[in-house]
C-alpha cells in the first residue's frame, strides 16, 4: 500500500496514516499537512487516522 500523495510505502511503527476522502485512500500525516492542506493541519477530508505497527510474530 502506497501513500496517495507521495506514492511511497508506509513505514511500520513510525508512520501515522490518515484515510483521506479527497485523495480516496491512505496518506502519510506529513504529506497531508505539508503537501495538501492549505492551513498546515489535517482538514475535514481526514476520515480517520491509524498508526502503522508490526504485530509480534508468534
Image (spheres, helix red, strand yellow):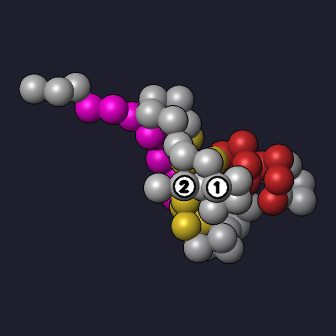
- The answer, for residue 52, to whether it is visible in the render is yes
Q: Which residues are magenta?
A: 47-55
Residue 23 pos. (x, y %): 66, 70
Q: Residue at the location (54% across, 46% down)?
A: 9
Mark 1 crowd level (few <14, some 14–19, many ≥20, 10 Å Cα): few
Instruction: Find the distance from the CA under tag 1 to the CA under tag 2.
Output: 5 Å
Circle 1: element type: loop
The reply, left or right, for residue 54 in relation to residue 27 is left
Q: Residue furthest left?
A: 58
Q: Could you say which is closer to the camera, residue 46 or residue 3? A: 3
Circle number at residue 7: 1
The reply, left or right, for residue 33 in relation to residue 20 is right
* Above/below status of 45 relative to 27: below
The reply, left or right, for residue 53 in relation to residue 36 is left
* Above/below status of 45 relative to 40: below
Circle number at residue 32: none
Quarter holding the C terminus? top left
Q: Could you say which is closer to the camera, residue 53 or residue 47? A: 53
Q: Residue at the location (17% across, 27% down)?
A: 57
Circle 2: element type: loop
The answer to the question of whether label 1 and label 2 lie on touching residues, with beta carbons closer than 8 A, is yes
Q: On the image, numbered disc 2 is attached to which residue?
A: 2
Q: Could you say which is closer to the camera, residue 42 or residue 26? A: 26
Residue 18 pos. (x, y %): 57, 54
- The answer, for residue 18, to whether it is visible in the render is no
Sequence order check: which comes first, mark 1 or mark 2?
2
* Above/below status of 34 relative to 12: below
The reply, left or right, for residue 3 in relation to residue 5 is left
Q: Residue at the location (47% across, 40% down)?
A: 51
Mark 2 crowd level (few <14, some 14–19, many ≥20, 10 Å Cα): few
Residue 35 pos. (x, y %): 82, 53
Total label count?
A: 2
Amino acid at each position: 500500500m502506497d501513500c496517495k500523495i507521495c506514492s511511497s510505502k508506509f513505514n511500520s511503527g513510525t508512520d501515522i496514516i490518515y484515510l483521506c476522502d479527497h485523495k480516496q485512500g491512505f496518506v502519510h500525516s506529513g504529506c497531508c499537512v505539508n503537501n495538501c492542506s492549505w492551513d498546515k493541519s489535517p482538514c475535514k477530508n481526514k476520515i480517520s487516522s491509524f498508526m502503522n505497527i508490526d504485530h509480534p510474530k508468534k
